[in-house]
Amino acid sequence: MNIQRRKTRTCTVGNVKIGSDHPVAIQTMTMAKSEDAKAVIAEIKTIEDSACDIIRISIPTLDAAKNIPEIKASTEMPIVADIHFDPRLAIAALDYGADKIRINPGNFYDRSYLEKVIKLAKEKGAAIRIGVNAGSLEKDLWEKHGAPTADALAESALRWVDFVEALDFKNFVVSIKSERVQVMIAAYKKFVEADNDVPLHLGVTHAGSLIPGTVKNSMGIGALLMQGIGDTVRASITDSIEKEVEVCKNILKAIGLYDKEADVIACPTCGRLEVDLEKMLAEVEAALKPIKRPIRVAVMGCVVNAVGEAKESDYGIASGKKAGALFYKGELFKANVPEANLVNELLELIQEKEQIKL
Amino acid sequence: MNIQRRKTRTCTVGNVKIGSDHPVAIQTMTMAKSEDAKAVIAEIKTIEDSACDIIRISIPTLDAAKNIPEIKASTEMPIVADIHFDPRLAIAALDYGADKIRINPGNFYDRSYLEKVIKLAKEKGAAIRIGVNAGSLEKDLWEKHGAPTADALAESALRWVDFVEALDFKNFVVSIKSERVQVMIAAYKKFVEADNDVPLHLGVTHAGSLIPGTVKNSMGIGALLMQGIGDTVRASITDSIEKEVEVCKNILKAIGLYDKEADVIACPTCGRLEVDLEKMLAEVEAALKPIKRPIRVAVMGCVVNAVGEAKESDYGIASGKKAGALFYKGELFKANVPEANLVNELLELIQEKEQIKL
C-alpha cells in the first residue's frame, strides 16, 4: 500500500534534503554535553552506521557553539544546533557553521533578534527548524485557546511561518510537538489544512522511557506518515540515541518508507514451538545486517501461518519438529531441512539469489 | 481528546466483558508448552499483577487441553484456548472448561465440525474468537483477491460471522490480523463498514522482536483505537509476555484508554541536562507503581518546557542546576528544592494530596 506523500518543497540541510521528493529523513539528538566535543563525537560514532541521517546537538552556551566545527568535522551527517531562549546562541551557531538551527521563536527572550537570525541563516545557506512545542506556547495563544490545544499549536506554527516567509526565507521545516499523541496528530493536520508546502518534522515530545516512548512515537508519527504527512522524524525517547534511530527506522519500515534494509518478519513464539525461534530470528537478523535492500524474509516457528507468509515473502523458513522447510518467492524451495541447517541454508539461498556475500 | 468508541454488543469471557460498554481488555499469550501445566502457570504468575485481563494458551494436543482445569485454577484471569487445524481440539478445550476458544475456521481441516463447536460453546457459556489471519486465508478468497488484501481478509471475517450468527451464537469477537500494518488497519475498517456490532480483537501478527514489534503494534492497534475501533488488544512480540502486556497498556494509556495507573511524562534527555534525569524518572516511576489512578506527573530536566508541562500536569518537578522546583496542579508549589530532595518532596506531595501511602 503505497503512501501518497503530501507535496512539499525541499529544505536542504548539509548533504541531506528534506521534503516529499526525498526519503523521510531520520534524526536523533545527542545526550552528551555539547561543551564536551569529544563526548558528543563519541556518541555520534555509536550511530555512524545506523539509519540516522541528521544529528541535533543542544547549544545552551557559547562554549558549546564553539565546538560545532570540531563536531562537524567528525561526521558526514549534517549538524543541527538546538537553541532555546537566547537568540545570540542561534547567531553563534550559524557563525560556527551549523547546517541547521532549531529555534522556538515562542521562547526567545528577545524576538527583535529573530530577523537577524533568519537573515544570517539565509546568508550562510543554513536551514532552520521552527519548533513549536506545547510546553512553550506563546502567552497570547495560551490565553486565546485556554491550553496548548491542536488549534493553538497550529496557529503558533503558522504565525512563525508567515514571519519567516515575509523575510523571503524558505529553507525551513516546521515541527509542532506535544507529548499528547492525539493533540500532536491533530495539530499537524490542522497545519496541513492551511495548504502550504512547508516540509514537516514529526515527533512526540517527552515520550518517556523505551517502551512508552516507542509506543507514543509510533502511534503519533505513524498515524501522520500513513496519511502522507511528514518529511523527517525524530522519536524522543529517554534512552540511547541508537534506540531512537532504531525506533524511527522501524516506523518507516513498517509502512514501506524505508528501503535500505531487509525486512525480517517472525511469528510471536507460542506453545506450539518445537524450535528455538528467538535464537533463529536473532541469527537471521544479525546475518542480514549488511543487506541494504528491501528483501522480505519470514522466520516462522510452525506451519500454522508459514505457507501463507512464505507466499508474501522473498525468502522464508518454517520450522517443524527437528526439521523445516525453505521457501523462495512464495514457493516451497526445499523440504525436510534439518533444524540445525535451516538458518545456514536460508542464508546461502539469499546469498546466491541476491548475489551478495554475507 | 475523548475517543468515541464504535458501538458494539458485549462478549463475556469468564469474569471479563469485551465490548464498547467496557474498558478495552488487554490480552497476552503464554510461550510455555501447554502440555507442561506448571510451566504455563509459572509464566502466568509473571503477569499476575500487571495490566493483563485475559490469557491465551495454545492447545496443539489433547494433553494440552487436559491441563486447562489446572491452569484455570491457578489464576483469576479467563483462559482462552488457541486452536488450529483440528476442530476436535476445540471440542476438547470447551469440555475442559476453556472460557473462550480462538479458532480460525479457514484452517480447520474439516469444517463440518464447526457447527458442533459453536453449539458446544453456546451450551458451555464459553466465548469464541474468530481469528482471521493473512497467513491462512481461505483458498477461494486468495484466488478471488490474488493476495490476502484488506478486502479479502474482511470478506473472510464477515463470512464466518454470518455462519456463526446463523447458528444463533452471539458471544464472539473477531480479529483480522496481518503483519502488514496498513493491511491490518484497512481490513478492520472494511469490516466495520459492514455495520455490525461484533466486538473486535486487535493485533498485528508476526510483528517481530521488542522494538519492531512494539512499533508495528502501536501503529496498527493505535490507529484503529484512535478511530474508536477495537475492544480488546494483544501485541504479538517475540519477547516476554510481560513486555507484550506493557506495550498494550502503554498504547491504551497514550490515548486516555487506561485509567488504572499514574502517567509519568519526562523530557528526552539532552545536553542541557544538569541532573541525572533517567535516575529520577526511574525512581518516580517505581514509587508510583501502587497508584492505581490516572494522575499525571511531569519529570522535567530543565526549564525549557517545564512551566508549560507543569500547567498540564497534576504534579511536576523541573530540575535545574543543583536545585529544582515543585509544581502542583499547574502552579509553582515550591522553588529552590535541593536536587537531592526533589524526588522525595514530589512523592511526599503526592502522598499528601492523594491521601495514599507509597
Image (cartoon, coloured by chain):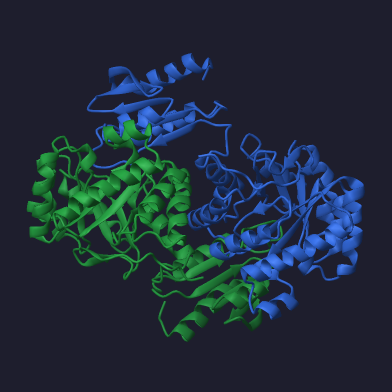
Chain colours: A green, B blue
**Residue at 13% in and 45% down:** A114
Q: Position of residue A45 (x, y in %)?
A: 26, 57
Q: Is residue A319 visible?
A: no
The answer to whether one can see residue A160 in this image is yes
Is residue B242 left or right of B300 when viewed as pictured? right
Observer-nearest of B69 and A8: A8
Position in image of residue B185 (x %, y %): 58, 60
How many numbered discs, if any?
0
Q: Is residue A65 left or right of residue B99?
A: left
Displayed quadrant of residue B341: top left
Q: Nearer the viewer, residue B174 or A62?
A: B174
For the residue pair A150 and B105, the one nearer the viewer reads as: A150
Depicted B137 relative to depicted B48: above or below: below
Looking at the picture, does residue B88 appear above or below residue B322? below
**Most foreground residue, A316 or A166:** A166
In the image, residue A142 sits, relative to residue B89, either above or below, namely above
Q: Position of residue A196 (x, y in %)?
A: 30, 59
Q: Which residue appears at 67% of the width and 67% of the height?
A: B153
Measured as percent of width and height from the top left, residue B305 is found at: 30, 35
